[in-house]
Amino acid sequence: MDQNAKQSVTSAAVKGRPRNPRTQQRILNAAADLVLEQGFKALSMDAIAGRAGVGRMTVYRRWPNKAAIVMDAFFARMDPNIPFRTDKSYIDSIRLQLRAIAKAYRGKNGELMRTLLAEAQFDPELATAIRERWVMPRRKIGVPYLEQGIRDGFLRPDLDPNVMIDLLYAPLYLQLLMGTSTLSDGYIDKIFDHAMRGLKRV
Amino acid sequence: MDQNAKQSVTSAAVKGRPRNPRTQQRILNAAADLVLEQGFKALSMDAIAGRAGVGRMTVYRRWPNKAAIVMDAFFARMDPNIPFRTDKSYIDSIRLQLRAIAKAYRGKNGELMRTLLAEAQFDPELATAIRERWVMPRRKIGVPYLEQGIRDGFLRPDLDPNVMIDLLYAPLYLQLLMGTSTLSDGYIDKIFDHAMRGLKRV
DNA sequence: GGAATTCGATACGGTATGTACCGTATCTCT
DNA sequence: AGAGATACGGTACATACCGTATCGAATTCC
């Protein structure tokens, strides 16, 4: 967000009083804290401003609504790069990638993603933002990696990489949204093994 | 819901004026219509009552909030029984079951389920209701059916039925919540084939 | 010094919530 | 027939949050 970034890339040529550089982070921290303490329903622009020690207009000047704030707060916390490890076998590198995502979602980041996905069902712009800023960048890395695995003979040659990603990652999100369980490594391994070996008896 | 059902099972022994038997359905229809027309965010108890031609207190007397109404509206529309067909091969009966669910979710029922799942992230009671009234009853049918398939030699003997269900159905819900695609039969078949045959080259 | 912008603060109108009544209607029990 | 209980549509009320507007002060560029 932060659509008012009038700063030129080359130099700082803006007229008026500059924004306090710490305000951004103060607001994001306040929003994240409040969501995790009391849930998104109890979150209000008022409470965010109060917790951040900031006027309400200062918040509205930078974000259009609370969902956009939580979105940015998620990215401020979540490490966007969970790479495939190359020190293991190809197949195991996928398993470890799944485990890494699950581990990240097990804590507060999972709680934020849960909130964002839910709110996105009522907010098309947020849905688009999640797709463009989170889902698509991840696919852009995953698809070529799976295609490489196909070329190298680790995966079946007739598979669709995007469908593979759906199959492997969807249970993780389903557990996040509907699950009673805790996204344990054991669960992830089960999903992974079932998917890799296939369900049908050969 | 309808927690005030004071009616005895054997006979109608209640004192005061009985509830109008049509009001229930009028409210459910009004709520479903409004959600599908304008979305859950724009839905209000006031609007529901107005559309149903009913006082607002009449709504509050029967449901605690709008999510509970939409929940009941979903069940009033959705046929809870999508059985496994026995006129096909065992493996194909699973594929057809997946397709049937996808077909149901392709239209208005999917819209309602999407709304319910989203709101459930902010409402623990609704989350419990979805699990107990929708997810669990369905698992109770699916698990034994898959166990039978294992016994009959159609499925790998070392699989966990609950994990299989996650693997097969999670992509469907993920598409419902995050998807750009339309839950087409083609997509379902791809998920199904990938899961059945497995991803790893043998 | 003047214009522009940010800052914290406050006021405002609009909307939805949940509760409390009101007068009326309809049923059961005595 | 009468009393008690409950449902009905309607309205009023206090509360909360939203999004916008405006204020005076502060800070920066030209």
Image (cartoon, coloured by chain):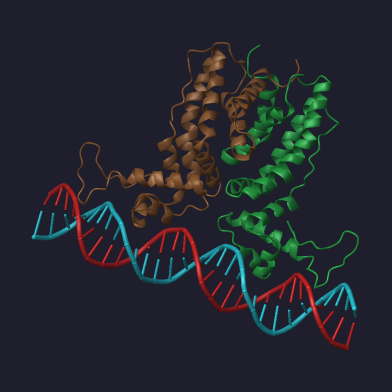
Chain colours: A brown, B green, C cyan, D red
- In the image: residue B10, left or right of residue A140: right
> Where does residue B80 sit, x and y in percent of width and height?
77, 45
Seen in the picture, residue A193 relative to B61 is either above or below; the reply is above
Seen at 49% across and 46% down, the residue is A37
> Where does residue A153 sit, x and y in percent of width and height?
58, 11
Seen at 73% across and 22% down, the residue is B159
Which quarter of the rendering shows the N terminus of chain B? bottom right
- In the image: residue B94, left or right of residue B32: right
> Where does residue B11 sit, x and y in percent of width and height?
90, 63
Seen in the picture, residue A102 relative to C20 is either above or below; the reply is above
> Where does residue B121 sit, x and y in percent of width and height?
58, 46
Rendered image quadrant of residue B26: bottom right
Q: Nearer the viewer, residue B61 or A194?
A: B61
Q: Nearer the viewer, residue A23 or A33?
A: A33
Seen in the picture, residue A52 relative to A109 is either above or below; the reply is below
Seen in the picture, residue A182 relative to B110 is either above or below; the reply is above
Rendered image quadrant of residue B21: bottom right
Which quarter of the rendering shows the C terminus of chain B? top right
- In the image: residue C14, left or right of residue B54: left
- In the image: residue A60, left or right of residue B61: left
